[in-house]
Amino acid sequence: MVQSQTLDRTFSALSDPTRRDILERLSTGPASISQLARPYRISLPGVMKHVRILEEANLVTTDKRGRTRECRLGPERMDDATRWIERYRSQWEHRLDRLEAIIERRKGGRT
Amino acid sequence: MVQSQTLDRTFSALSDPTRRDILERLSTGPASISQLARPYRISLPGVMKHVRILEEANLVTTDKRGRTRECRLGPERMDDATRWIERYRSQWEHRLDRLEAIIERRKGGRT
């Protein structure tokens, strides 16, 4: 169930717009909590809470440097999440193709 | 913010292993709530709750037929979710490439 828990944490971390923003911001380079907080109307502890959720999902790592905490992208590359969605999408497409074939066959029967 | 809310709902719906299972099950064909509940040790109302969350994310549609409720895959194909993850991953890779280039340059300077 390890992989399942990783997926739970990854998808849960991505389900919030502020957390997705933070990841996009960190993909341009490391930032402190207060730098991350600047564009938002939320408190530092609020941002810290989001960062902690990203950290638990291994999407972010943080490093205390004196009085600031530097954040950067973590080791989780979302390979499992991508794989899950892609597998699902291909089953979905396959199912649509089958439905289309059934409809085509029925059409053929009618003419 | 419509797209953002769609992403919130999609990722949130995917953050639970039972809901991911239900989607995989439905990708093989429609099923009633009690058919969906069979492999789990959770109650029918428990399954119904998961189905409702999937329905709100447009990942599932349901249709009341007499005393049963038939569930099938909904219109949401996770295109936005895939796009978001893929864009993020490409930025991540790009960042790794840049880091690698910096390390290579430093190595070069040392020799």
Image (spheres, coloured by chain):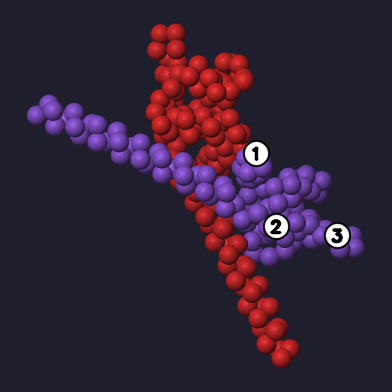
Chain colours: A red, B purple
Quarter of the rendering occupied by the N terminus of chain B:
top right
Q: Rate crowding at label 1 as few (under 14), some (14 to 19) or many (20 or more) other CA atoms within 10 Å.
A: few
Indicate which disc, 1 or 3, sits on the residue closer to the N terminus: 1
CB atoms of marks 3 and 2 within 8 Å: no
Q: Any mark on residue B74, and which?
A: 2
Indicate which disc, 1 or 2, sits on the residue closer to the N terminus: 1
Q: Residue at x 68, y 53 (%)?
A: B59
Residue B108 in which image quadrant: top left
Q: Any mark on residue B64, and which?
A: 3
Q: Amino acid at mark 2?
A: Gly
Same chain for the residues under marks 1 and 2 in the image: yes
Q: Residue A11 at what x, y percent from top left?
A: 58, 40
The chain containing the residue under callout 3 comes to: B
Q: Residue at x 58, y 30 (%)?
A: A18
Q: Which dot, 3 or 2, sits closer to the camera? A: 2
Q: Any mark on residue B1, and which?
A: 1
Q: Secondary structure at mark 3?
A: strand
Indicate which disc, 3 or 2, sits on the residue closer to the N terminus: 3
Q: Amino acid at mark 3?
A: Lys
